[in-house]
Amino acid sequence: MATKKQLSAEERFRLLAENSSDIVYQTSGLDIEWISPSVTRALGWLPEELIGRPAATLVSSHQDLSFVETNRDRLEHGQDVSQELLIRSKDGSEQWYSGVAHPLLEADGTLHGFVVGMRNIHNKVQTRLRLQESEEKFRTAMVNAAIAVAICNAEGRVVDANAAMTDFLARESSQLRGQNIADLIGAEDPRHTDTLHRDLLAGSRDSYRTRSRSALADGFVRHGDLSVSAVRSTTGEVQWLVYQVLDMTEQVHARERLTELATIDTVTGLPNRPTIAQRLAETITDTVRWGGSVGVLLVGIDRFRTVNDTLGHQAGDALLREIGIRLRQAVGQRADVGRYGSDEFVLVIPGAANHDDLAGTASAVRAALGHDFEVRGRRIVLTSSMGAAISTPDSTAATVIEHASVALSEAKRAGRAQLQVFDEVMASAAAFRLKVESELRAALDGSEFAVYYQPVIDLGNRGIVGHEALVRWQHPVDGLTGPASFIGVAEDSGLIVQIGQQVLRQVCVDIAANALTGTVAVNTSAVELSDPAWLDSVLTTIHSHRVDPTRLVIELTETAVMTTNRDVKTDLSVLRNLGVGIHVDDFGTGFSSVSLLRDLPITGVKLDQSFVAVLDSGRQSAEHALAHGLMQLASSLGMTGIAEGVERPEQAEILHTMGWPLAQGYLFGRREPLPA
């Protein structure tokens, strides 16, 4: 019986190496003596092309070789070494490999060569490098952020904090690390915050927002607007907690001082709202005795919030003080001046009997505020809107101020920087708005709002790729009505917040029921964005209906972002990180459209229909060039582009040629939008 030939150790090694997907080679000195055939599949080299050449032939010229001397020393001492190497393929492409070298020593201990095994780890290294880059960017952003930021582990122990956080808590970084964040930043409402935090850790929410109260070592208390968000692993486990605190101490103390001081506005030194209202009541009583009347001028500073947002609240207060001084100087003894609201001043004008009397005082106010202001070295130009009313024998202070307030709203609605005097027509309009507001409240309770959908079309294949949600009111008397008849009143009254919540809930219901194709865009107003609870409401709705966030798009206009009374970048970033799209509606019509793309996490733009309406293949208009340029801008930023108001095939063809991928309009169905 024949005896089987036993393989030598070298033969077994060669057999394994030749059949492995890894690359194995052996050197004599520094030259390749043998290399496994797998080098051809992996790098394109034939073994015979490499045998006899230096092993460095395989190493990229971009490789950092600072390790060579250290590794050679270890090999000469009989130690294995491992190293990540950037390896060059025959075609010049480069990939990362993990190499392990085993020394081959002569009998006298000198290094003859080495055996190297290399495994492809390119994807792993690329992932690690991207992660390192992302972490570096996050670290840079955190360190330089003006808002206080602390990174904590899942147990709430501080791992790192930026300079703004050390300033906020008046502690050094070394004093913060390892501390329980709850001991440093307390909640104003601990019970509610504990519930929110448990939900965060349990995974039912990814962030929450609350008010904080932090007692410093010297006894000083800092108040903050606290946002807490979770960074989770791929399995959903909490890895890090990110605490962000916006210092609200000055605002809180200002509110406390206003409560303490019963008569004087602490910012301007003018009579405050209750005091000026009392003076008006007394003036009306005195004037009625001799048959006269009293005029009230309510002055609103246009876009005052921009000063606060740009220069800060201290600068805003300084500006308000200067406005108060100028108003008192402008009217002298003719009127009493008081601060009525955040950016509103009220003037009580005894004896004012007609429009001319009010107009004269208004002219003095406009002249006083028309000169430039200087705050912190910055020149500020202001305009003011004014609403006026004249008392009657039956008037009370409340009714005259209410009439002036209605007139001021009309002045702002008419375009700002105007004077409106209250009259019966205005009264009728106000009464109508009150009626609509009352009906809207009933409509919310009676679930009279319905959501209709307009399709979004792929201009390439004319298929439906998404929808825009549009609200309709099933009025019990007037029947189905569009938003134009009620949205203005809804926004003025704040009811748009509840309407928006109902619309989003219905959209999530329809998505969950698989009644819609693609993404669904939901319009969001400035009033909704201004609501501090807006983000929590959106997140709760998405989670409660178990809707994939990538199916939703928040659609907002430039005006909505610019007129909201708070910074919404954080809220929008939270939604974007979940996968929710953020689109800018009416793109190209405002002054700051491009800056929005820079400052906010925008994922798509909607070309305003005014650009689409004038598209004509027979001529090249300015709108044509702008529409083309806006698409190139959106495309270069990796954003989705949607054209609105497409009504003619010619328009669709031009837009498609320009590169606009998606469109909406009557061309794709003349009927009104439909329910899901």
Image (cartoon, grey):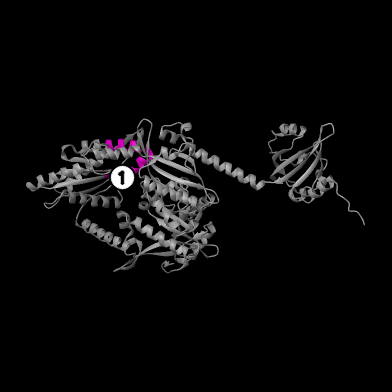
Residue 601, image x and y in percent?
47, 48
Q: Is residue 454 left or right of residue 97?
A: left
Query: Which quadrant, please, contains the N terminus?
Result: bottom right
Placement of 670 over or under 205, stated as above or below = below
Callout 1: helix, strand or loop? loop
Q: Furthest-left residue in view?
A: 290
In the foreground, 435 or 442? 442
Point out residue 239 in the picture as x, y percentages from the top left corner: 52, 45
Q: Position of residue 216 (x, y in %)?
A: 38, 33
Q: Main secondary structure of the magenta part?
A: helix
Asked whether the viewer can see residue 380, the reply is: no
Q: Which residues are magenta?
A: 300-321
- Camera-nearest residue between 56 and 36: 36
Residue placed under numbered mark 1 in the picture: 302
Q: Residue at x 32, y 43 (%)?
A: 304
Q: Is residue 278 visible?
A: yes
Q: Residues within 10 Å of mark 1 (few under 14, many from 20)?
A: some
Magenta-drawn stretch contains 6: no
In the foreground, 591 or 537: 537
Q: Position of residue 186 (x, y in %)?
A: 39, 40
- Which amino acid does the dot numbered 1 rest on? Asp
Among all residues in the image, which is located at the extreme front?
1
User: Residue lying furthest right in this view?
Assistant: 1
